[in-house]
Image (cartoon, rainbow, N blue to C red):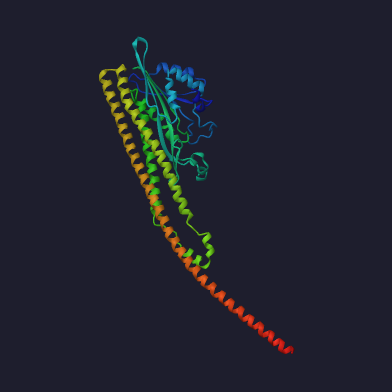
């Protein structure tokens, strides 16, 4: 719990949704603050379904009073402990949220209560990726610590050409069910600036509880996982757009070589130009930037594969949990089987969606490797052309140097002849001077 302290804030804003259950429709909601925990406990007693949402501060349009600690969860340490105690939460749930790079998957715990009544609790941390337009200007991005270390998949991936970021986050989920009552806690770590995305699970689950008379214990999980699958698909689609932009840049520069015609003319006129040739540094810098971006993309794709594999395992475990839940659920057998089959079908559908996203990921990985190979070929071809042009330039220089050498030799011979003539003129002048003196 101590390691979770850096995520807590001093103010509470836990959103709570409740439903009456027992074949009744309708939903109530409240914001759990510092003063109304007693009201929350009363609400728990009379509600069959209860879902708590713990988010960062969601910056909806029009909100001006934004707290300084907007990046922290809207729950205090004391309130979080009270919620965990009220729901008899396993310590493993908190551990799964602070495990860092290690994904722990889905955990379960079956407890026998009074009158041999069983209660099943399970928990997992869902890795998510969302693609959104850049919040910052390009200059601000360049100064960012995360952008300076794009190879680290723990940070967001900046897609400079399409002005999007793929941001990593996680959602911790804990559920408790005893066949009659259903309790769920959702801890969403997503950036509050993504108000439409961060608020989506709350809106969907509230609508589901309000309109459904036979709300099932896994319905909120299905809503959350379906949103996650769509976010993943959108993020990889934006990454595909960025890769397509890289392909266009590389293809456009594939045949581009340095035009040395003007340079050679200058070198013929002035051999000192050899010390500072006007090489196309801009193109080299662009190729280097693309190469760095592609290596960063490969690093992130490796993490994406791990995350999507973990989601598939969570979905497989949820199918097992579904069977356990409906074995202890106190409903009519026919309706239980009908709802159980519907839940299994929904989980299977989401699992197929995630499998499709993972196949799409493998396709992007192959495409990234192909672009890296194409870029290497372009750079090699460009370097070969530069070597050819350099050889031609050197031949021109040597030819010019030979001409200058011949001219220098001619000038030396002329200088020697002039010196000889000057000596002869000097002797003649001395002779004339002697004759005149005599």
Is residue 188 depicted above or below 114 in this figure? Answer: below
State the residue in front, 195 or 232.
232
| Furthest residue toward right | 437
The quarter of the rendered structure image containing the C terminus is bottom right
Q: How many callouts does the rendering have?
A: 0
Q: Is residue 425 left or right of residue 123?
A: right
* Residue 20: % across, % down: 37, 20
Q: Which residue is depicted at the point 52% across and 45% down?
A: 139
Residue at x 37%, y 21% (from the top left corner): 108
Classify residue 313 as left or right of residue 267: left
Asked whether the viewer can see residue 29, the reply is: no
- Name the side, left or right, on which 415 lies relative to 192: right
Where in the figure is residue 182, as x and y percent of width and height?
37, 20
Against 170, residue 383 (above or below) is below
Task: In the rendered view, tell whether residue 429 sits above or below residue 237.
Answer: below
Q: Is residue 281 visible?
A: yes
In the image, residue 368 lies at what x, y percent?
Answer: 37, 44
Image: 298 above or below 399: above
Please identify the residue farthest to the left as the structure is shown.
334
402 and 62: which one is in front?
402
| The image quarter in which residue 411 lies | bottom right
Q: Where does residue 428 sit, x and y in percent of width and height?
A: 66, 85
């Amino acid at each position: 719990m101590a390691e979770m302290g850096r995520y807590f804030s001093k103010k509470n804003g836990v959103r709570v949704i409740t439903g009456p259950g027992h074949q009744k429709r309708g939903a109530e909601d409240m914001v759990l603050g510092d003063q109304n925990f007693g009201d929350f406990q009363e609400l728990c007693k009379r509600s069959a379904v209860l879902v708590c949402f713990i988010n960062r501060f969601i910056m909806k349009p029009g909100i001006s009073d934004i707290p300084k600690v907007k990046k922290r969860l809207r729950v205090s340490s004391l309130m979080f402990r009270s919620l965990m105690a009220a729901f008899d939460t396993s310590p493993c749930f908190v551990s799964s949220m602070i495990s860092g790079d290690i994904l722990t998957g889905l955990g379960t715990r079956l407890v026998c209560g009074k009158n041999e009544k069983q209660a099943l609790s399970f928990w997992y941390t869902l890795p998510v990726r969302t693609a959104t337009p850049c919040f910052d200007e390009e200059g601000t991005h360049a100064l960012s610590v995360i952008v300076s270390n794009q190879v680290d998949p723990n940070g967001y991936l900046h897609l400079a050409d399409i002005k999007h970021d793929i941001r990593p986050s996680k959602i911790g989920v804990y559920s408790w069910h005893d066949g009659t009552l259903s309790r769920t806690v959702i801890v969403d770590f997503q950036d509050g600036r993504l108000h439409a995305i961060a608020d989506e699970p709350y809106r969907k689950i509230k609508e589901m509880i309000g309109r459904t008379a036979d709300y099932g214990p896994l319905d909120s999980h299905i809503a959350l996982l379906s949103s996650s699958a769509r976010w993943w698909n959108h993020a990889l689609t934006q990454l595909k757009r960025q890769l397509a932009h890289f392909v266009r840049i590389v293809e456009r520069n594939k045949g581009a070589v340095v035009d040395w015609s003007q340079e050679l003319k200058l070198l013929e006129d002035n051999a000192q130009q050899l010390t500072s040739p006007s090489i196309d540094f801009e193109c080299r810098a662009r190729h280097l930037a693309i190469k760095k971006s592609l290596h960063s993309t490969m690093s992130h794709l490796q993490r994406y594969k791990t995350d999507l594999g973990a989601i598939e395992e969570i979905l497989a475990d949820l199918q097992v949990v579904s069977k356990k839940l409906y074995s202890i659920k106190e409903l009519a057998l026919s309706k239980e089987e009908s709802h159980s089959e519907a839940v299994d079908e929904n989980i299977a559908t989401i699992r197929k969606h995630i499998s499709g996203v993972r196949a799409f990921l493998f396709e992007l990985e192959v495409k990234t490797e192909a672009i890296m190979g194409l870029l290497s070929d372009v750079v090699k071809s460009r370097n070969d052309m530069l070597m050819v042009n350099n050889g031609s330039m050197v031949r021109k220089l040597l030819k010019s140097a030979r001409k200058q050498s011949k001219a220098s030799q001619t000038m030396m011979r002329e200088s020697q002849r002039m010196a000889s003539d000057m000596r002869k003129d000097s002797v003649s002048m001395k002779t004339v001077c002697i004759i005149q003196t005599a």
